[in-house]
Image (spheres, grey):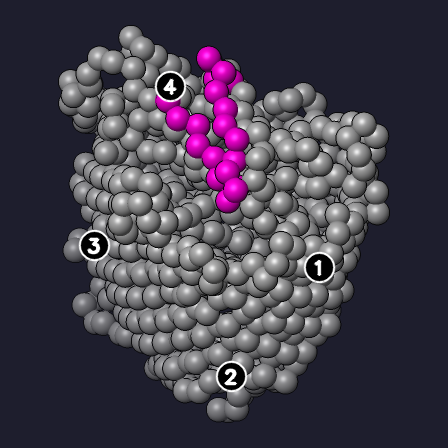
Amino acid sequence: MNFKLLCISAFILGAAEASAQEGQPYGAIRGVVIDAASGQPLPFASVVALNASPAAGATTNEAGHFAISKLPVGRYDVQASLTGYAPATFREILVSSAKEAFVEISLAENMQALDEVVVRSVVSKEEPLNKMATVGARMLSVEEASRYAGGFDDPARLVSAFAGVAGSMNSNGIAIRGNSPQYLQWRIEGTESPNPTHFSEVTGVGGGILSALSSQVLGNSDFFTGAFPAEYSNALSGVFDMQLRSGNNQRYEHSVQVGTLGLEFASEGPFKKGGRASYLFNYRYATMSLAGKLFPGLLDDAAGIGYQDLSFKMNFPTRRAGTVSIWGIGLIDNYLKNPSKDTADWLNSFEDVDDFKQIKLMGGVGHKIFLDNNTYLKSALAVSYTQNHILMEQTYRDQSVFRVADMRGANSNVTLNTYLNRKFSAVHTNRTGINVTGLFYSLDYSSSPDPNDYPPLPMFCFAKSNGQSMLLSAFSQSTIRLSEKLTANVGLSGMYFMLTGRWAIEPRAGVKWQALPRHSFGAAYGKHSRHENLDYYFAEAPQASGRLANKSMDLTRAHHVVLSYDYSVSENTHLKVEPYCQYLYRVPVEADSLLSLINYQTFYLLKSLVNDGKGVNYGVDFTLERYLHNGYYYLLTASLFESRYSGGDGIWRSSRLSKNFLVNALGGKEWKMGRQKQNILGVNVRLSYQGGDRYIPADEAASKAAQKMVYDNARAYQAQLPSALLCHFTVSYKINRKATAHEVALKMINVTGYKEFEGYYYNYKANEPAMHQAAVVIPNICYKFDF
């Protein structure tokens, strides 16, 4: 494998280097400066590229826009300042010869005159984009999305490096502070969205393989891990509020990438030169089969994966009618797994034949208009459609074939939301809005109750329904600056789920105290609730005799308290500590059983549930970050936590995701190379060490007697897998020419070859139960051309 990697990398690097020419390439930084509370553009603000030599800067025009041109390629920190406002610094902006950088910098208005208060510059990465968030929030920047090792251009995998977030190899599900990944809410362009991930739910509820959003189109986005603002409802563990960036409206820019995992093409630019409207789109076609052939044995069953996606955004600023944006995402997934032809290789009495197809379409129209200098109205209409078909068969050694699952589903959502944001003064800003979502569903799920029997029990239809329902929510939240050092965020959210007639009123509150220029403390409380996946409500469990046993399920609810301490160690280093406690109640569980949706992994449900379950998550998260400065950066995170739950039997146990600890060390170094120092060699590495998942052990004696898997429920989740050490790295070399750039990269996921536990099976060769563990090592060698 190493020889193949070396040959391919050397070939691509040689081709790129041969195309380079002498001469100093330049780039530019453009952007807009706005008022943090009102969103109004700020004219006459001073903008400076702090580490430019010679000094470079600009002043914003009447529309708040600025441009700093003729910058040598490299990384820059940009600071914006304006009389009456606290200065703000935007870090780690990469200036390339082929692509202009665009940043939006928000400034907070001072409450006192300049000579009465010492104001420290606010660093972009220390605060989320949503200024009404007090704690448990972080911005994921465009630059980080393309740089962090182990991300594979997938924002879901990138955030697993943040404190309190557990990731895995086989899924990009986001498990926050011991919660199930399904308790996270995905949002795109301001509206709640289905999971925008390839092969979503198949690898476990709430997860998938890779996001359909490439870093080519992702804008700066917010990631929340608890006690989030009132505008976010129908979520328990966190919110990933993703934004698509707008295309360049000044010039055309294109990108082509070819690698062992597939092909990607992106383009952006103005609809017409001199106009303000722009477009941006990105298309990817990927197949694991090529990498599987180049590196046999590394990808395991993942070699059968193939997918493609298309995403776009069109932006239309007008002079008087505000700004209109149109966006869309589409993905197509295919997965086929066939049994090994040599039955001597089989460890089980049968081999699975899996055929999975999925189509997802999401799109919407957004509109933002300023009603006056302190008020804007933001609205969005979004539509989504998901269609999936799963066929599962079992082929036995005697060549008999039994179908054990045939599941077809189609879901459509139509969402309308709007909110009014008004800055009453430097002291008080309010945001109030409503959300209406129409839910349309068509379900036809059939499965065998116990596919481990031979022959498997006949399939029965456990969920079949066509219909519609609605989800209604409203909120109001305010930021109140009690002083220059003390800020409060308070809000109230309400939600009504028409399918079951259940509703919730949710107060949210937070306070932040800037005790010293470099030290701040925060505290926040939030009550949260969430409805379950729609097919759960229509499940006809075998013991329910055709009755819709779950149709009246209540919302799962939670109280969440988070404290925080922030310390700016230096201008480039930041420390954050966040203790937290979350109490969940009315959790759906199976009566007189250990089963709880807190631990549930399978994407379909054949159980009758009651809302008698509980759960508790508590711990502390640590983050120490050095921003990219003088060519290197690091992000060190650690989490110590406990996650417990009570099932339908009333017994408290550790939950499946109670790993107890998570440690991440992420870092990188960049070297400027070439005669004019115009090229960049980058090395990025991520190490993750985390406690193992908990599981239900096998009852060996009972399994041998039954000749199939039988589990020891009395010891459920007492057993824990060994701690996992994962390593990912990226090595890249970028060559900047005049108006073009070449980049060759080697990206590796799971260099250590860690084997994840995928469940038990009965090993008929050894006549005993055995663990199924598999290591997926994903290498991607790619060449990228920007022009």
Question: In the rendered structure, which disc, 2 or 1, sits on the residue that comes first in sequence?
Answer: 1
Quarter in which the N terminus is drawn: top left
* Residue in the foreground of this view, choosing between 594 and 379: 379
Identify the magenta region. 51-70
Dot in front, 1 or 3: 1
In the image, 304 versus 161, the foreground residue is 161
Q: Secondary structure at mark 4?
A: strand
* Residue 501 magenta: no
Lower position in the chain sequence, tag 4 or tag 3 = 4
Q: Nearer the viewer, mark 2 or mark 1?
A: 1
Q: Which mark is residue 340?
A: 3
Please state which of residues 225 and 770 is positioned toward the viewer in this rendering. 225
**Three-letter code, disc 1:** Asn
Whether tag 4 and tag 3 are in contact, CB under 8 A, the answer is no
Q: Which residue is mark 1?
A: 430
State the residue in front, 738 or 607.
738
Q: Badge 2: few (under 14), some or many (20 or more) residues near its Cα, within 10 Å?
A: some
Three-letter amino acid code at the position of disc 4 = Pro
Q: Gap between marks 4 and 2, in whole Å?
A: 56 Å
Q: Disc 3 versus disc 2: distance between alpha carbons?
A: 45 Å
Look at the numbered discs 3 and 2 and tell me whether their residues touch, using CB distance below 8 Å: no
Residue 739 falls left or right of residue 542: left
- Residue highlighted by disc 2: 469
**Dot 1: within a 10 Å radius of its alpha carbon, few (fewer than 14), some, or many (20 or more) residues?**
many
